[in-house]
Image (cartoon, grey):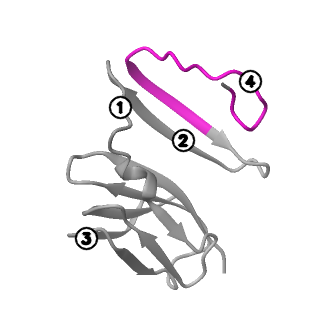
Amino acid sequence: MSNNADDSPLNDNLQAGSFSVTVYDNKNCYIDTTFEVGSTLSLATPVLSDFVIYPNPAQSQIAISLPAAGDVALYTSEGRLVFKGHSNSSKTQFVNTSLFESGIYTVVFINPKGESLSKQLIISK
């Protein structure tokens, strides 16, 4: 098994623990994330895989397609909360970003089980 970036081998036999990952793009932009690997890893409920943000980059509005009920938050690159919302069902939530400054934001989705996923959003005016 290998990743698409450089065909280096992936570790598909991870031990339980906490891991940090930093991903860089070709413009040297990056996003950091930390995840936990338990003693058993199951993909039986891929709830978080359907979390989609569009358009990205965005200017005045984004749509966040949620896979389930949960909370959504947007943070600046400095960690300042600029939006927080809640949805009682899986649906698309629209966020007015016209007053946001240009930059890189982190969008975080947390489902009712406390599982979270974050994605990078670029606001470009």
Q: Amino acid at mark 4?
A: Ser
Helix, strand, or loop for circle 4?
Answer: loop
**Mark 1 or mark 3: which comes first in sequence?**
1
Residue 5 falls within the magenta-colored stretch? yes
In this rendering, the label closer to the viewer, 2 or 1: 1
Q: Is residue 103 left or right of residue 68?
A: right
Q: Is residue 65 left or right of residue 57?
A: left
Disc 3/disc 2 C-alpha distance (Å): 26 Å
Residue at horizontal 51%, vertical 77%?
100
Q: Position of residue 26 (x, y in %)?
A: 79, 49
Q: Classify residue 36 by image quadrant.
A: top left
Q: Please say if 31 is above or below 68.
A: above
Q: Quadrant of the image for the N terminus?
A: top right
Disc 4/disc 2 C-alpha distance (Å): 20 Å
Q: Amino acid at mark 1?
A: Ser
**Mark 4 or mark 2: which comes first in sequence?**
4
Residue sitting nearer the eye, 86 or 4: 4
Residue identified by numbered label 1: 42
Disc 2/disc 1 C-alpha distance (Å): 23 Å
Which residues make up the magenta segment? Answer: 2-22
In this rendering, the label closer to the viewer, 1 or 4: 1
Mark number, residue 32: 2
Q: Position of residue 62 (x, y in %)?
A: 50, 77
- Marks counted in the figure total 4
Do the numbered discs 1 and 3 sit on residues whose CB atoms are within 8 Å? no
Do the numbered discs 3 and 2 sit on residues whose CB atoms are within 8 Å? no
Residue at horizontal 73%, vertical 48%?
25
In this rendering, the label closer to the viewer, 1 or 3: 1
Q: Classify residue 85 by image quadrant.
A: bottom left
